[in-house]
């Protein structure tokens, strides 16, 4: 049970102040009765709450898939640059949203944005072995040695050791798919650098068993289906 004003504010109906005005105007009903008090306690899972006759679909947390474009930063706010949160359409905005893991400013592709800290932790923790798959274009052809090094575990010049990465060749000798279960800073780019190659284009195409929706243009986002959420953590 929670206060009706708090619940409506959490579901993107406005600030607590705006929500209390909405309630006072008499358009909010709980189980068919006009709600008269902003502090009325309701159970959002079982009570039917309507605003202007429209039932609210209560969601404790939001899970959003974005096709991150190049040129925006994976942060909740930034003094200089546009963030992925700035790109969200009005209906997907809510307090507390953050990108679960970072893609570099110039990296594109699958990014999960949520307000569920526990979910993000599970997805990002290397111990959970949720692999993130990238498509990389290099400035040099892929070699057999790269594949071997990636699978053995790349070691950076400062001694940091990466876990085993999966490496797949593509039809194009300048490109490869790489899957990693960690999120070290600039990890994929640095792994290729150790092998003497620069990444000239990077796109994340999958997290766990969840693939980037091909229908999302760069910069577009949509809510995840419930089953898609499970595809991420299913290992
Ligand atoms: N590895 C990188 O180097 N950059 C990213 O954005 C993601 C993984």
Image (cartoon, rainbow, N blue to C red):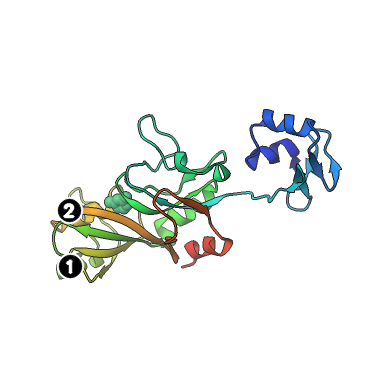
Asked whether residue 207 is in view, the answer is yes
Quadrant assignment, res 125: bottom left
Asked whether 78 or 67 is in front, the reply is 67
Q: Position of residue 173 (x, y in %)?
A: 17, 67
Q: Is residue 178 above or below residue 121?
A: below
Q: Which residue is drawn at 79% across and 50% down?
A: 47
Q: Mark 1 points at which residue?
A: 173
Q: Does residue 94 appear to the left or right of 19 in the view shown?
A: left
Q: Residue furthest right?
A: 33
Q: Residue at x 13, y 56 (%)?
A: 196
Q: Distance between the residues labelled 2 and 1?
A: 14 Å
Quadrant assignment, res 155: bottom left
Looking at the figure, which quarter contains the N terminus?
Answer: top right
Q: Does residue 234 appear to the left or right of 226 in the view shown?
A: left
Q: In this view, does 3 lie above or below 208?
A: above
Q: Is mark 2 on a helix, strand or loop?
A: loop
Q: How crowded is mark 1: few (under 14 residues within 10 Å), some or many (20 or more)?
A: few
Q: Count the labels in the image.
A: 2
Q: Residue at x 15, y 59 (%)?
A: 195
Q: Residues within 10 Å of mark 2 (few under 14, many from 20)?
A: some
Q: Where is residue 200 in the image (x, y as percent from the top left)?
A: 21, 53
Asked whether 42 or 119 is in front, the reply is 42
Q: Mark 2 points at which residue?
A: 198
State which mark lies toward you, 2 or 1: 1
Contact? badges 2 and 1 (CB < 8 Å): no
Q: What element carries label 1?
A: loop
């Amino acid at each position: 049970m929670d206060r009706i004003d708090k619940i409506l504010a959490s579901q993107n109906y406005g600030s607590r102040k705006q929500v209390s005005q909405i309630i006072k105007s008499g358009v909010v009903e709980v189980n068919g009765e006009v709600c008269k008090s902003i502090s009325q306690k309701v159970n959002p899972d079982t009570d039917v709450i309507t605003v202007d006759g429209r039932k609210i679909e209560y969601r404790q947390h939001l899970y959003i898939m974005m096709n991150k474009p190049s040129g925006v930063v994976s942060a909740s706010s930034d003094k200089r640059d546009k963030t992925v949160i700035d790109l969200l359409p009005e209906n997907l905005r809510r307090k507390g949203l953050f990108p679960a893991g970072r893609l570099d400013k110039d990296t594109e592709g699958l990014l999960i944005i949520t307000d569920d800290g526990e979910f993000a932790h599970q997805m990002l923790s290397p111990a959970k072995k949720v692999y993130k798959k990238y498509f990389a274009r290099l400035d040099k052809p892929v070699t057999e040695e790269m594949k071997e090094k990636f699978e053995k575990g790349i070691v950076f010049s400062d001694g940091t050791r990466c876990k085993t990465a999966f490496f797949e060749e593509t039809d194009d000798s300048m490109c490869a798919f790489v899957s990693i279960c960690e999120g070290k800073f600039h990890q994929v780019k640095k792994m290729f650098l150790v092998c003497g190659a620069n990444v000239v284009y990077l796109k994340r195409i999958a997290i766990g068993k969840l693939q980037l929706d091909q229908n999302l243009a760069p910069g577009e986002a949509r809510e995840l289906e419930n089953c898609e959420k499970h595809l991420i953590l299913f290992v």
